[in-house]
Image (cartoon, rainbow, N blue to C red):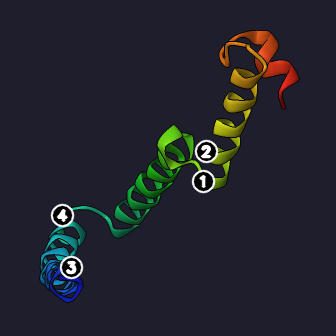
Amino acid sequence: MLARALATRRFIAQSAFPIGTVIAGWAAAVIEPWIVVTLSGALLAAGTAAQLASPGDHTLEARRCARRRARRGALRGLDSTSAFAVRFTR
């Protein structure tokens, strides 16, 4: 099953290369190359910033610590979302 999934990913990656080359060639013919590179870098930076700001991309350790804090607050009889619980269970 894993081999099939990896083979599919490899097929998609190898199929995307010619498409990317065609798009890059067209863009270089129509638009100045420095503009294409600048826009690509800006798009990459914006995507990276969006991933870093996304709460879904936190590390497993951060999630584990948050659960531990919530569990400690529940054991103490505190609501884990209250300001007191957040402030004193860290």
Callout in the foreground (4, 2): 2
Residue at left offset 73%, top offset 24%: 75
Mark 1 touches mark 2? (CB < 8 Å): yes
Question: Residue 47: horizontal and vertical position, in percent?
Answer: 44, 50
Q: In the rendered view, would you say 84 is above or below 36?
A: above
Circle 3 sits on which residue? 9
Q: Nearer the viewer, mark 3 or mark 1?
A: 1
Nearest the eye: 48 or 38: 48
Tell me residue 69's x, y (percent).
73, 33
- Which comes before the other along the chain, label 2 or label 3? 3
Element class at badge 4:
helix
| Quarter occupied by residue 30 | bottom left
Instruction: Identify the mark nearer the N-term, 4 or 2.
Output: 4
Q: Nearer the viewer, mark 3 or mark 4?
A: 3
Q: Kindly identify which numbered label has been placed on residue 63.
A: 2
* Mark nearer the N terminus (3 vs 1): 3
Identified by mark 4, the residue type is Val
The local secondary structure at tag 3 comes to helix
- The residue lying furthest to the right in this view is 88
Nearest-to-viewer mark from 2 and 3: 2
Q: Which residue is mark 4?
A: 30
Type of amino acid under label 2: Arg
User: What quarter of the picture does the C terminus occupy?
Assistant: top right
Report if residue 88 is visible in the image: yes
Amino acid type, label 1: Thr
- Asked if marks 3 and 1 touch (Cβ < 8 Å), the reply is no
- Report the disc number at residue 86: none
Determine the secondary structure under disc 1. Answer: loop
Left or right of 69? Residue 40 is: left
The mark that comes first in sequence, 3 or 4, is 3
